[in-house]
Amino acid sequence: MNSIVRVAACFCLLLSLAGQLVSQTQQPSPSPPASPAPPPGPGGTSLPNADPFPSTYKPFARTTTVIRNATIMTAAGPTMTNASILLRDGKIAAVGPAIVIPADALVIDGTGKYVTPGIIDVHSHIGDYPAPGVDANSDGNEATNPVTANVWAEHSVWPQDPQFPRALAGGVTTMQILPGSANLIGGRSVVLKVVPSRTVQGMKFPGAKYGLKMACGENPKRVYQTRGPSTRMGNVAGYRAAWIQAESYRRRWDAWNTTHKGDPPARDLGLETLAEVLRGNILVHNHCYRADEMVQMIDIAKEFGYQIRAFHHTVEGYKIADLLKANNIGAAEWADWGGFKMEANDSVKANLAITEALGARAMIHSDSALGAQRLNQEVAKAMYAGRAAGINITEDQAIKWLTINPAWALGLDDRVGSIEVGKNADVVLWSGNPFSVYSKAEKVWVDGAMLFDRSDATQKWRTDFELGNVKESN
Amino acid sequence: MRLILVLLFLITATVSVFAQTVAITNAKIYPVSGPAIAKGTIVIKDGLIAAVGDNVTVPAGAQTIDANGKVVTPGLINSLTAIGIIEIGQVRDTNDATAKGTNNIAASFRVWDGLNPTSTLFAPTRNEGVTTVIVVPRGGLISGQAAAIDLGTGHAADVLRRGPVAMMAQVSSAAGAGTTARGELIGKLRALFDDVKYYTSHRGDYDRAQTKTLGATFADLEALIPVVDGRMTLIVDADSMAEIDSALALARDYKLKIIISGGAEAWLTADRLAAANVPVLTGAMNNIPDKFATLNQRQENAALLRKAGVKVALVGNDDSDEAQFNARNIKYEAGNAVAYGMSYDDALRAVTLTPAELFGLSDHIGSLQAGRDANLVVWSGDPFEFSTQVEHVFIKGREMKEKSRQDLLTDRYKPGARR
């Protein structure tokens, strides 16, 4: 019974937090109206220390590989049948019906099988809420203040979380790990490659921009009900107060960066992150369910001159997809989650399909280590629900919900998310059509290195935690 | 006005009892109780299945549905839900799944007494092929009594198929039982069953207040008598191998008729489950070691249990909302079970006839045979595939066509609609 009432990390772990809050109020100082934002500078150069936890990821040993005679869903054009793909030096070197097979290539027969880009999950808490879900490792919500722009999700990531290899086995090669949704502003996200590593730095996607997690609605006002915000209007006042401080901070630093005269302004980690959002160097990922609240968040972004990159959950995205399109905001959605709280009550299975049909950039996301393993199945549900509602979503559209659209949300669509020559060789070989319930990822490559092979248990990635805890047959 | 209401009631009642005779022809029929029929006919009359087979005459005057090769199965049964007792998880006033109880015991709590038959979850669940759900209480040590609910329309009494169908208990959470150690929880259960036995043989003394102090209230002791007699099934939520073995020991010592639910590590004790003839309610989509009691949870669990000869009914995995909003997804649990080693026939049985048998309902639902209730579904293809749509749903012979709230929202906002 306990098991059937448990719910996924992002929306359940908040329930018990309200009593644990540290009393600590924020006193935003008044500030003059915003000056027009200068164009975004190159990533991070405006910071005193732009990259204090640099990626140490190095691609794994790889073999020049050809998968031949497969059905290839490219996410860049029409699905190719009886086609081949060449993975060389970590890149997709060729794709098409007739490619030259290098003499040194490992050739894999893809007859009857499908190839897709590696799946990208833009909403995960793996590593921050690891398994087993014990208090000692529950590190996803810094629920001590409604605004914690100063925290970075990567500092909570446990690379030995057994949920990582399970996501890879579901074909996920890139994921964004976000702080939870307890706070109005939860902190920085981190983009990881789903690879074994002793350190989080060894998983960090080189050159990926940071994200900022923001959250609307029920979670913050529930978590902070005794100290505030305790209402949606309190939420909005909280976002605005934070951005007012951030504008002021940004002005002080931009001025000093120009003149380098005198002592630099005192650093503030939280405002530093928010200022980078205002400069366009950090992408905003905004947890928001209800249509009306999303539109209020769009107005707040306009007030302070930042761009929301994507709404997450976006349960009512179908009601405002035209506005999401007009404001160039991505919509990360579930296929069918809903009903677990009031703001999720208008969930419909055609959400992704309607969002797409009205021209907004739709994508799947998991928010769940279970869902992450079957994002292909989630997309299948959403695609066919669209068709049942009379919206003819093609497989070529649906594959983008798994790949290139989330890549865009992370600012990585020039490197991953589609099968095109020159892109990173993040590729999945499926036993059949990935939109069938019976299909499984058979092999998964990251930067051209095969890191998952269902047929070879001896090479299976097992985390330190699993050794001696989880039987090898599992 | 009152007369009109009475007439309306009579008309409604008449319709549900004497629905039109319907014949579904040219169907690929999975009776589940017997081999599939490649091209056959099902006749529905007076709420029952009147005939099934490849040589059935369509009665004169019957409404005919030409299935044109499409698939007919019994309506699916989801064995572990909170439909009608939890509408919105985080809205307290819509939660009627957990009784306060006394001393963490709520055996006298009957979920159907608080069932909401106007729940918005009935329509989307049945529209995706689930016609009956087992609604189970939650929480405590003994949670209360579960009921079988048909996802039809009307009053609670109209949709209640049977209550109780089982008592719900757990050995997976010491805290939930009001204890601090698993062994203490087991001890508390043993003491409780001993008290029920003592109470049964000392009723006169009890009425005269001349018994020792018992660990449960009068109502709860009474409610537990059929469990201790072995007449009522006790569902025991247990995850780890050790928890399941504890439950098996209790069942052996007290001669209880139990079903394990959850059963994350059941595959590790499959032989014992088979030897004790204890069925398992479990899923096929969870392989996360999310508790120390579920370290060896795996997607092959259901298939391995079947191979060992254990009866399995598939239920939603325990993440998110699969007991309520997504109780409809039981068909995908079955599809994934097949992907992870279960035979197709076993998987279909695990969401139809097996749960009907486990809850004493198989004389009426769970298979397509003459004389059974006409709870059945016409599918556009393989019921477990995402590409398949439900084309017709019958509950007690009545075709269910009501749109769900989700359908109405979709209609309002889909492209071309007036918002």
Image: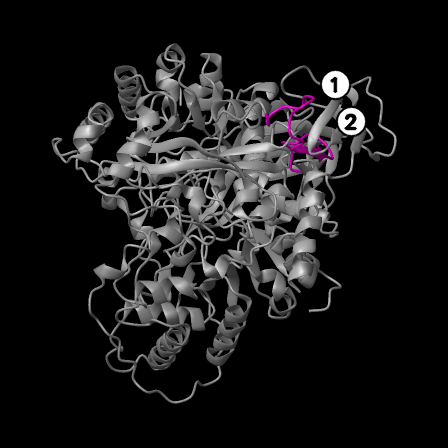
Q: In which quarter of the image is residue B338?
A: top right
At label 1, counting other C-alpha atoms closer than 10 Å, the crowd grade (few under 14, some 14-19, many 20 or more) is some
Q: Which residue lies at the image location 38% right of the left edge and 78% below the top edge?
A: A237
Q: Which residue lies at the image location 46% right of the left edge and 36% below the top edge?
A: B147
Range of the magenta residues?
Answer: B364-387
Nearer to me, A473 or A337: A337
Percent x, y of residue B415: 73, 61
Is B208 on the left or on the right of A1, as rendered?
left
Q: Which residue lies at the image location 53% right of the left edge and 49% below the top edge?
A: B117
Secondary structure type for disc 1? strand
Do the residues at discs 1 and 2 belong to one chain? yes
Is A124 part of what is drawn in magenta?
A: no
- Outermost residue to the bottom: A32
Label 1: chain letter:
B
Query: Circle 1 sits on which residue?
Result: B37
Q: Answer whether residue A335 is visible to the viewer in this image.
A: yes
Query: Circle 2 sits on which residue?
Result: B27
Percent x, y of residue B276: 37, 13
Percent x, y of residue B394: 68, 37
Up the image or down, A74 lies above or below B308; here it is below
N-terminal of the two: label 1 or label 2? 2
Question: Label 1 sits on what residue type?
Answer: Ile
Q: Are marks 1 and 2 in contact (CB under 8 Å)?
A: yes
Is B384 part of what is drawn in magenta?
A: yes
